[in-house]
Image (cartoon, coloured by chain):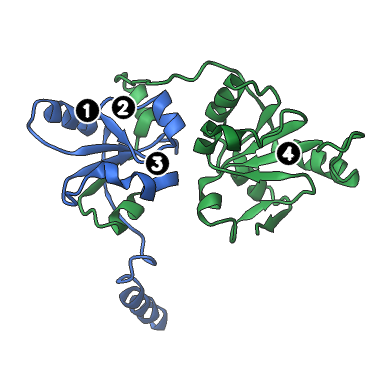
Chain colours: A green, B blue
Amino acid sequence: MAVAIKDLGFSNIRIYNGGLKDWAKAGYEIESQEPLPEYEGSYMEAQELLALIRRTDIEDCKDKQGNPLFTILDYRTELVHNEGKDLPVISTKCPQLVMLLDDFADPVKRDTIPRTGTVILVSETGNRDPFAMRYLHNHGYDNIVGLRFGMRAWIKAGYPVEMSR
Amino acid sequence: MKRIVLWVMLMVYIFPFSSLAMERFDIVTTEEMHAMLKDREEGKMDFLLVNALDELLFRNEAIPGSINVPWANTEGAVHRLGDNKDRPIVIYCKGYR
C-alpha cells in the first residue's frame, strides 16, 4: 500500500505498524461509522476442505437438483489486482467466485453469492473473515464459513492449487 | 571472496530499481501515533492518517481522524490524499502480524 502511494508521487510516508490491534490494546478510542452486527461465524480447517473437495469432486460438485454442493468465494485483494493471472487458487471442480470485500456492498455483485449450498470464504490469512461473515450474515446469508488461516494455510499444507485464469 | 564480490555487484545493480528493491518506510509506534494526533489536534503539526483497509472494515472501526484509502482501490481513492505530495502521511491497517 505504502509502495503504491509512493509510486503515485507522495514522498513523506510513514507506517503505523501496530495498527488497529495495538491501538485498541493500548486502550485508545476506536470510532465506528457503521458497526457490523455481532455474529459468531463458523470455520473450516484446510484439511476439512480438502476432504470435502475430494468427496464432492467425484460427484462433479452437484447435488441431485444440479446445484453446487459448495462454492468458494475467494476475496483476496491481490487476486483481483492481478486479474487472476498469476496466483495459486484452490483446485476444485466446484464453482469459485472472485471479488473484493467491498464488492459485497454492491447488491448486484452480492447477489452472485449463492444462498444455498455452503459458501467458503478464502482470504489471504483469514483475518478479514469474521468481518466478511458479519456483513454477509447481516444481508441474510447463513451459509457462509471461513477457511481458517485462509490461503496461507492451504498453501502451507501443500494442498492442490492451480493457477487462476 | 568470489561470492562476496558477486553479492556486492548484485546489490549495486539491483537496488537502484525500486520495483526490485525492498522498500523501507519509517515506523510509528503507538505512543508516537497518539502524540502525533494530539499535536495535530492542537495545530502543532499536520499529517494525513490513512486507513488502508477495505471500506467496509474502515466503516466498522477506525482510529478517529483517519481517512480511508483502501489498498484494494488505491487509484480510485487516491484523490482523498489531496494534491500536496509532500504532506506527511501515516498509513495503518489491522496490524495483525
To which quarter of the image does residue A135 belong? top right
Q: Which residue is mark 1?
A: B34
Q: Residues within 10 Å of mark 3 (few under 14, many from 20)?
A: many
Does A99 sit above or below residue A43?
A: below
Inter-mark Cα distance, 2 to 3: 15 Å
Asked if one can make out residue B94 in the rendered structure from this viewpoint, the answer is yes
- Identify residue type, mark 1: His
Q: Which residue is mark 3?
A: B70
Query: Which residue is painted at 16% across and 51% down in the image?
Result: B86
Contact check, label 1 and label 4, Cβ < 8 Å: no
Same chain, marks 3 and 4? no
Q: Which residue is mark 2?
A: B63
The residue at the far front in this view is A108
Q: Which residue is mark 4?
A: A71
Image quarter of the N terminus of chain B: bottom left
Determine whether, in the image, residue B73 is placed left or right of residue B34: right
The earlier-in-sequence mark between 2 and 3 is 2
Instruction: Give me the chain letter of mark 4.
Output: A
To which quarter of the image does residue A65 belong? top right
Q: Residues within 10 Å of mark 1 (few under 14, many from 20)?
A: some
The earlier-in-sequence mark between 3 and 1 is 1
Image quarter of the C terminus of chain B: top left
Inter-mark Cα distance, 3 to 1: 22 Å
Query: Which residue is painted at 90% across and 43% down in the image?
Result: A59
Inter-mark Cα distance, 1 to 2: 10 Å
